[in-house]
Image (spheres, rainbow, N blue to C red):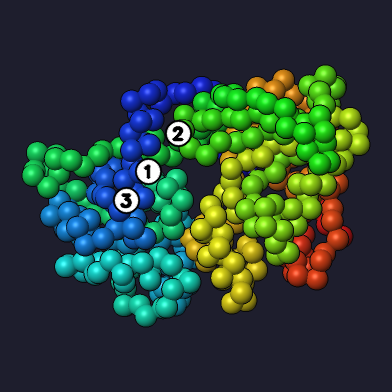
Amino acid sequence: MKTALKPTGNALGTPRTRAVHRAIAEARRGVPVVLAAPRPLIIAPAETVGAEGLRLIDLLSSGGAMLLLAPARAAAVLQREVESQAPAIALKLARPLIDSETLKRVADPTMEQILPHFELVDPPDAAMAALALGKLARLLPAMVVAPVRHGWASLPAGHDLLSVPAEDLLAYPLELAASLTKVAEVAVPLEDARDARLIAFRALDQGIEHMAILVGDPAAQEAPLVRVHSECFTGDLLGSLRCDCGPQLRGAIARMAAEGAGAVLYLAQEGRGIGLINKLRAYTMQDRGLDTLDANRALGWQADERNFSIAAAMLRALGMTRIRLLTNNPEKVASLEACGIEVVARVAHEFAPNGVNDTYLATKAARFGHYLG
């Protein structure tokens, strides 16, 4: 179950959350940052690091560099089994460090796989936090890491590098939920719900907003009908037949209009939380024979990376802490209840296969435990 803790406020504070925001931006640019921990590391994502970033890691490291991978990706690279429950698998990188294009191929299984031989080494203590930075940046969770030299900040190469505590990266997802605020509300008549209103929520990272679609006055009901829907660009907007997201979204709005009230929480968590680009990569892996669960894992992600604490925070802000949940997913029920939301009933929300998404729906039932069929 994901993010089952109840948000308790912005415990990190402004300066520390600002450091996390900067670290995410640096990761997306391929700029190394220093991970502050008992054994500090200099780290950069394999997907974005370039020649200059690798040069800085080489200059500022005090020991051997490693490539951190999630177990599923490491097993594919090594072509043998690894400890599947480990937080990360570390592969030794010889000096001078291999080129950035090779690192990208190692990180991304959708690229042509001409890979060098790697040797397994023990991962550093802060390995989970290092991979967390890649995930927060919506990059592939594959990180180049090395122990950083003592006094790195006083060296010319280290003057401009950011330092961020490892514990702050791990705490950050719950901080996002705790910091949600309503920033806009407006009536938007919809084809299936003429009395709909949109409420936009923004978190402290100032990133993509989450939306609540209110039909009627759900807060006036004892247990309003609620749908927690993760955005799906391909299904919701383009009408993709690979999933059932579009029918689920439109069907939820129509059902709430028929009942007279309800709320759809539209979460900016594309692809079960891995982001749009990574979802498209997962589609490539599915086209090569993997199901939707194994495709995510092949990229180094968990099967479901969504943060349902965000949904719980939105419901509290809307005055809806006792709900009927429109879902086939028992994980959503359990996660919301763990966050303090009372789910008095699960309401089925099933749509027939369309001839393209049959295997996708079967996988949701067999491997994710959805109540389908």
Residues marked 1 and 2 touching at CB (< 8 Å): yes
| Residue displayed at 43% across by 67% down | 108
- Quarter of the image where one finds residue 143: bottom left
State left or right for residue 123 relative to residue 111.
left
x, y percent for residue 274: 54, 53
Q: Earlier in the sequence, mark 1 or mark 2?
A: 1
Q: Which residue is mark 3?
A: 29
Q: Which residue is mark 1?
A: 24
Mark 2: few, some, or many residues within 10 Å (few <14, many ≥20)? some
Compute the Cα span from label 3 to label 1.
Answer: 9 Å
Which one is in front in this view, the residue at disc 3 or the one at disc 1?
3
Q: Residue furthest bottom?
A: 114
Mark 3: few, some, or many residues within 10 Å (few <14, many ≥20)? some
x, y percent for residue 149: 14, 47
Compute the Cα span from label 1 to label 2.
Answer: 10 Å
Numbered circle sitting on residue 3: none
Mark 1: few, some, or many residues within 10 Å (few <14, many ≥20)? many
On screen, 19 above or below 2? above
Q: Specify the quadrant that holds the N terminus.
A: top right
State left or right for residue 154 relative to residue 47.
left
Q: Earlier in the sequence, mark 3 or mark 1?
A: 1
Q: Earlier in the sequence, mark 2 or mark 3?
A: 3
Amino acid type for the residue under numbered disc 2: Asp
| Residue displayed at 67% across by 40% down | 266
Label 1 sits on a secondary structure element that is helix
State left or right for residue 95 relative to residue 328.
left
State left or right for residue 364 relative to residue 77.
right
Label 3 sits on a secondary structure element that is helix
Q: Specify the quadrant that holds the C terminus.
A: bottom right
Amino acid type for the residue under numbered disc 3: Arg
